[in-house]
Image (cartoon, grey):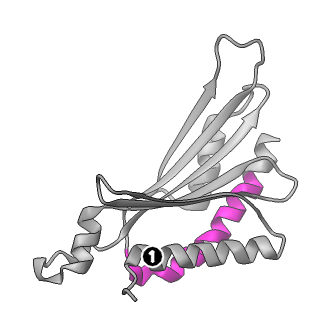
Amino acid sequence: MFDPTAFDNMKVVIEGALYDLDISGEIVITDRNDSVNMAKMSRKFDMTFRLPEKKVKATIELKSGLVNLAAELLPSIQSEEQAGCMLSLKFIAAKEESDLDYSALKALLLDIWGPTRIINQNVLYDPLSIDPAHSLIITIEFDRLIHEDQIEDLVEMTEFIITTLKRLNEEIS
């Protein structure tokens, strides 16, 4: 048996919170990935989900690198502040036409997540296609390590993600 790392503990909390919401019917989980990069000794976990009968998807991603793992497993190097994970969110929506007010969307996201988050919006489309469909990809980054003592915040964060999904579905549909 091994002692789970901060990454493992946070991953289990996120999984549990999302699977509880999936079982209760509040969300539908559409994808889950848990990767280990042996060349870089890093880990990445993500889960993608949406509200029932809605199109906008959310992905929550947790990453941990070699520095984060070493800081946790080797306390003698005295870099405990590096023992944590990077967290990011992604919201993806398909839209037939590009008639969105992206400034209003950013204001909506800042209202939910606050001004200290890094929020980016990207629009993807095939310029050679006759189909006018495009994808809007919104990323929210926290620009700091999430530590194990903030683990309860991860469960609370799911409420903000659900609120964001509801509001984006209203704006984009």
Picture quadrant where residue 133 is located = top right
The residue positioned 82% from the left and 76% from the top of the image is 24
Figure label count: 1
Is 25 part of what is drawn in magenta? no
Residue closest to the eye, 109 or 86: 86
Q: Nearer the viewer, residue 104 or 1?
A: 1
Q: Nearer the viewer, residue 64 or 148?
A: 64
Q: Which quarter of the figure is the N terminus placed in?
A: bottom left
Q: Which residues are magenta?
A: 147-167
* Residue 35 appears anywhere in the view: yes
Classify mark 1: residues with Cα within 10 Å, few (<14), some (14-19) or many (20+).
Answer: some
Q: Residue at x 28, y 71 (%)?
A: 69
Compared with 123, 137 (above or below) is: below
Q: Determine whether the residue tagged by mark 1 lies in a helix, strand or loop.
A: helix
Q: Position of residue 6 (x, y in %)?
A: 39, 78
Residue named by callout 1? 8
> Percent from the top left, x then y, of residue 111?
60, 57
- Location of residue 46 by image quarter: bottom right
Query: Does residue 80 lie above or below 26 as drawn?
Result: below
Relative image position of residue 143 (x, y in whole percent): 38, 57
Which residue is at a point 74% across and 54% down the rendered structure image? 167
